[in-house]
Amino acid sequence: MTTKKGIEVSIAASIAAQLARVEVVAAYPITPQTHIVEHLSELVANGELEAVYINVESEHSAMSACCGASAAGARTFTSTSAQGLELMHEILFIASGMRLPIVMATVNRALSSPLSIWGDHSDIMAARDTGWIMLFCENGQEVVDSIIMAFKIAENRNVLLPVMVNLDGFSLSHVIEPIEFPSQKDVDSFLPPYKPLYSLHPDKPVTMGAYAMPELYTEAKYAQETALINSKKVIIDVMAEFGERFGRHYKPVETYNTENADFAFICLGSINENISTAIDELKSNGKEAGLIKLRLFRPFPKDELLAVLKDKKRIAIVERAMPGGAANSPLYNEIASLIYANKLHITLENYIVGLGGRDVHPEDFIDVFDMKIAAKKDNNNYNVIGVRE
Amino acid sequence: MRLKGLELYTEHPEAEFAVSGHRACQGCAEILGLRMALKVFGKDTIMAMATGCMEIISTPLPTTTWTIPWIHIAFENAAAVASGIESAIRILQEKKKIERKDIHVIAVAGDGGTSDIGLQALSGALERGHKFTYICLDNEAYMNTGIQRSSSTPYGAMTTTSPPGKKSIGQSTWKKNMPKIAAAHNIPYVATACPSYPFDLFAKIKKARTVNDPSYIHMLSVCPTGWRIPPDLAIEYGKLAVRTGVFPLYEVEDGRYRITYSPEPLRPVADYIKGQGRFRHLKEEDIALIQNRTTAEWEELKYLCGLR
């Protein structure tokens, strides 16, 4: 019988990596990721985790060293945030293109400039198309469970792709939550040791990272894309097996009160808890709003989203990133393309909140529901809640 | 005159780990030097290579030149990739997931991948003390992308981004001293080498392979294509670089500098410079300036070796 323990989510994330018996960690400190890697280096220093902790000199080298370690057959973990994710950017594509099952906890933070150490999703949205599987977490329990599941997904022979577990900086990474840890025995049984298909070893030499001429590049990328799309089935299976073994059930798309409402919010990450609070408040006043939570962001869970969206009349897409000159924020654009392709008639609204750690209040979402914050009608279809113009 | 301590080899080791069929230019001394080095590193070697000439001539999908495990991730990170491999092999052996044997990791990059874009990753890996050998294959410019200058390009050389002109002599800076930068990390073994001197090269690779910490080999790789010389003179130009003092052969073992092949009396640098198309625009006074600098650097090296 497991018991819940009050613990900081960052520490819990590193314990999850420990339970997964990671063998190489290469990381570079950046706020708000630091508590994760500090605790991992402590676990290695105390002999509580049999692993090598590489104190690399940059995030670029962190991801490069992770690629080398993973290619040599070690279970590999790292963590970063914001500028660090951007510095790794080049190598993120290579990790996925070379099918290396690295797991990374990305503690989502705003990008400079202006410099901000606080949370939003501008970092991950700039890295969203790097070919990684991407999970988002609403609370600390999801972080722990996702990291353990991430290795099982990544290392599946039909997947062999890196997995990013996203958690919001500070508002999730630095809070203390009651978390239930599975036993080492149960994790070992769920997640057997990594057995690479190919690895760098003199007894069976392989060439990794060869270049492709135009007659092969397209096929190589198509094969990779196919693997990423097909990974969804494995992700669903792993989530189901996790539910059976540990009693906590996850799905690529999770919902709250959607069955009762024509209106729903769609959001990623910890703000979902604020939105749930707003939905409860609305319900107590006789109003029905739903929430669609994307637990899986890459591969984009189209079918699962459509199943929930199809009978809705109005959707508010809430996002923690600026469009950067695009028509709308990234998540909006993807949902709009899904809706257009399936000829659904749904009114879409785009709300941008919580940039650079700006507080987000449940009342904001009540106002959205009540249309007190009108969707803009000018060229900018999106509305930045609370901005002082 | 051959100095003591390096008389380990009197013939070429037979083993080959870089097989034929690669696409290096005629007369490429870089693939030659790497091939020689691999003969000594031997079978139980894992190679992490930076983007560059050696990568691009050796591995067009689905073919490979390498019969040892080889990986390429990107341009600026060969040392970081090697760090990851070395760490993984170490922990997997400790955990008895793979058999315990002496596997050596090497990182290979060009002069741009080493002295420019890869310098930070290299410094980090040397400082952390991974047991690996880093080999810089120095052909003195970004040859793979079409002969652009690097910080390792010699003074006065014409490249496509350091063209001589009314207001330019060509490369306007002096070659960055990478071996000295490597040695400043207090690693146990640093050496220069050139495939024109194979036995010296073999012996230095052997030493680098043997030390238990990071080692660094800086190999001059004559590039007929980029230097504008006939391909059949690559070996000759390697010799001239050494005999003029432009590229001295030496090693730094536990901080002690030692010249491994003394070319004294030095031949004039003009003998090295005049036949190369990349220097053909230089005037006598430019060559005199290079001569002065070369002589001063040679004297400084002798001082470091306790020879004056």
Image: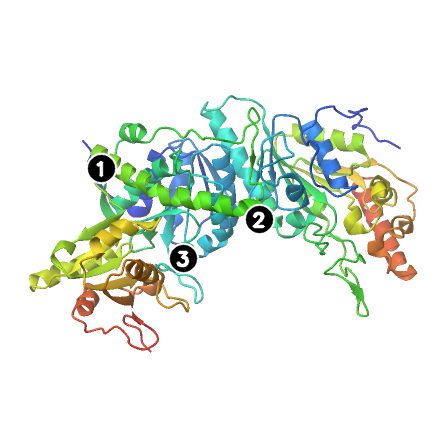
Q: Is residue B154 left or right of residue A339?
A: right
Q: Chain of mark 3?
A: A
Q: Neighbour class for label 3 at 10 Å: few (<14), some, many (≥20)?
A: many
Check disc 3 and give the amino acid type.
Asp
Question: Which residue matches tag 2?
Answer: A214
Q: Chain of mark 1?
A: A
Residue B219: x, y in percent? 74, 40
Q: Earlier in the sequence, mark 3 or mark 1?
A: 3
**Nearer-the-camera pick, A196 or A1:** A196
Query: In this rendering, do the residues under marks 2 and 1 share a single chain?
Result: yes
Q: Neighbour class for label 2 at 10 Å: few (<14), some, many (≥20)?
A: few
Task: Report the residue at 66% width, 27% height from top.
Answer: B210
**Nearer-the-camera pick, A389 or B14:** B14
Instruction: Say if A31 sits above or below A207 in the image.
Output: below
Dots 3 and 1: beta carbons under 8 Å? no
Q: Is residue A27 left or right of residue B236?
A: left
Instruction: Say if B173 sits above or below A198 in the image.
Output: below
Instruction: Say if A332 sits above or below B107 in the image.
Output: below
Residue lying furthest front: A343
**Nearer-the-camera pick, A58 or A7:** A58
Q: Is residue A149 left or right of residue B2?
A: left
Check disc 2 and give the amino acid type.
Pro
Task: Report the residue at 44% width, 63% height from top.
Answer: A112
Residue B92: x, y in percent? 47, 28
Question: Which residue matches tag 1?
Answer: A243
Badge nearest the viewer, 3 or 1: 1
Question: Which residue matches tag 3?
Answer: A123
- The quarter holding residue B209 reads top right
Residue B88: x, y in percent? 50, 33
Check disc 1 and give the amino acid type.
Gly
Q: Chain of mark 2?
A: A
